[in-house]
Image (cartoon, grey):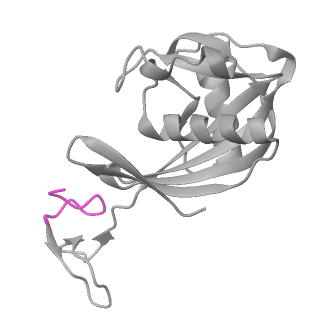
Amino acid sequence: MKFCSQCGAPVSVRVPAGDNRPRHVCDACDTIHYQNPKIVAGCIPEWGNRILLCRRAIEPRYGLWTLPAGFMENHESAVTAAAREALEEANAVVENLSLYGVYSLLHVSQVYLMFRGQLREGQASPGEESLEVCFYAEHEIPWEDIAFTVVREILEQYFSERRAGAFHLHVGDIIREADQFRIHRYV
């Protein structure tokens, strides 16, 4: 950031009074420009013993499979965002959403809020951001073509718990170390 979005004056990086971290601060109007993590909301759309995955039509990870998820909008709840993403990416209406996992991706400053939800009427088709959508049973999941580490983690936990017959809330961090990812689970 070079210029203030409030007044257009140059900004500098410094620790504002009463703070403990360097921030972009306007040299003219003293507006502090906070840079905080982005929130991603998504869901596991369930239909019988299958879940819905979307094959990405956008970067990053074009052509690979993921759960419907995306950035929350201002003035939108997490549940509404997760349902909206399923509708946008897979023309899927998801109901009865319940929080399944909270994952912090430290290397990209994102927080994923993932929900489980029931797909209404088992209907889905590709939205603008998807090349195709497909319902998968566990043994059919294209594991080698999953787009993101966090999605793989969520799917592995989900199917493990479904086999055990009980779902739990998960909290964890996805940590990038060199070219590898490490998962730190809290619960």
Seen in the picture, residue 106 relative to 46 is either above or below; the reply is below
Q: Quadrant of the C terminus?
A: bottom right
- Residue 129 visible (yes or no): no
**Is residue 3 inside the magenta stretch?**
yes
Q: Position of residue 160 (x, y in %)?
A: 67, 39
Quarter of the image for residue 149 reads top left
Total label count? 0
Q: Is residue 59 left or right of residue 157?
A: left
Q: Residue furthest front?
A: 164
- Residue 161 visible (yes or no): yes
The residue under the point 20% across, 46% down is: 178
Q: Nearer the viewer, residue 77 or 105?
A: 105
Quarter of the image for residue 3 reads bottom left
The residue under the point 16% across, 64% down is: 9
Q: Is residue 176 left or right of residue 95?
A: left
The residue under the point 50% across, 34% down is: 152
The residue under the point 34% across, 27% down is: 60
Q: Position of residue 177 (x, y in %)?
A: 25, 50
Q: Quadrant of the N terminus?
A: bottom left
Q: Nearer the viewer, residue 32 or 9?
A: 32
Q: Position of residue 119 (x, y in %)?
A: 79, 25
**What span is colored magenta in the figure?**
1-11
Seen in the picture, residue 125 relative to 37 is either above or below; the reply is above
Q: Nearer the viewer, residue 163 or 131?
A: 163
**Is residue 13 inside the magenta stretch?**
no
Query: What secondary structure prevails in the magenta region?
Result: loop
Q: Position of residue 99 (x, y in %)?
A: 71, 50
Q: Is residue 183 left or right of residue 136?
A: left
Q: Is residue 159 left or right of residue 173?
A: right
Quarter of the image for residue 97 reads top right
